[in-house]
Amino acid sequence: MALPSNSSTSPVSEFFLICFPNYQSWQHWLSLPLSLLFLLAMGANATLLITIRLETSLHEPMYYLLSLLSLLDIVLCLTVIPKVLAIFWFDLRSISFSACFLQMFIMNSFLTMESCTFMVMAYDRYVAICHPLRYPSIITDQFVAKASIFVVVRNGLCSLPVPILSSRLSYCAENIIKNCICTNLSVSKLSCDDITFNKLYQFVAGWTLLGSDLILIVLSYSFILRAVLRIKAEGAAVKALSTCGSHFILILFFSTVLLVLVITNLARKRTPPDVPILLNILHHLIPPALNPIVYGVRTKEIKQGIQKLLRRL
């Protein structure tokens, strides 16, 4: 497919995504594992949602929060991966102006929504272990509903200026994005305007949201660890920690991939430009694929619910 010339001075109406500028031959090799991971993520999260919906014993706040996490994972995957696979398989590199900025908004807002959901789940575990007698009165269905609204509204509103600022820039010539997805910096640097404020806002908003969530998660687990170390009954400490194990593993998946992505972007001059692009794609695939599997394997109630669901089919 021929790409348009960069010398055009007419306003840009669409962009062209060049996934791996230096190693485009990677695309065909990557398409199979990426498509398998995508199917795994979709299937595992859908199975988890159906199981929680049908199994009445799972109609509890902790599992409702897990359902919210699965919904966020599904939307993130559907926003990013089908377009990437369309580029790999059918060379469909073009993306409209509005679709590009919609994708940008969903990626920015849903990433911070996931982080905020982990923070709420950490608070849920804190109350369950540190204040078990008060848990039923604090962590209620109403609490989950209010927390879900907070997750969506806070992160949606704070992330909305990112695509708005980017879309208001003047794109008068270059329209080839050297990325598989419409990230803010990949798109805005094609503009003829100054993008200093655009970059500053994303940096401040992103790290304020993610940083505050991380601080609260660390505080929650610090209180949990302190409470567990005070438990003297034999086996009680291990049982208490096991209830947090799945959630802690999910946080590690999420933060580790994100941390590696940040480090490679900071060391951009020392790493090939295609490496951050690949890590960005994997960040939208690996946590969504592994999150429901971890809970399904480690949580007895979910495992039993999935077994019941499979027997019904």
Image: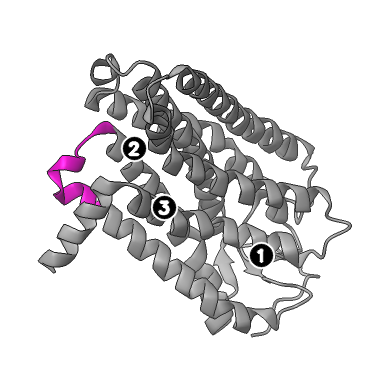
Contact, mark 1 vs mark 3 (Cβ under 8 Å): no
- Outermost residue, left direction? 312
* Camera-side residue of 241 and 208: 241
Decide if residue 20 is on the left or right side of residue 181. right
In percent of the image, x 58 and y 55: which residue is there? Answer: 283
Q: Residue 218 colored magenta?
A: no
Res. 278 mark: 1
In percent of the image, x 50 and y 45: which residue is there? Answer: 249
What quarter of the picture does the C terminus occupy? Answer: bottom left
Q: CA distance from mark 2 to mark 3?
A: 15 Å
* Camera-side residue of 66 and 234: 234
Res. 65 mark: 2
> Circle 3: is it few (<14), some (14-19), or many (20+) Cα within 10 Å?
some
Res. 56 mark: none
SS state under label 1: helix
Q: Residue 71 at what x, y percent from top left?
A: 36, 49
Res. 294 mark: 3
Residue 26 position by quadrant:
bottom right
Residue 261, compared with residue 205, is above or below; it is below
Q: Which residues are magenta?
A: 49-61
The residue type indicated by label 2 comes to: Leu
The residue type indicated by label 3 comes to: Val
Q: Residue 70 at what x, y percent from top left?
A: 37, 49
Contact, mark 2 vs mark 1 (Cβ under 8 Å): no
In percent of the image, x 21 and y 42: which residue is there? Answer: 58
The residue type indicated by label 1 comes to: Leu
- Outermost residue, right direction? 269
* Camera-side residue of 156 and 289: 289
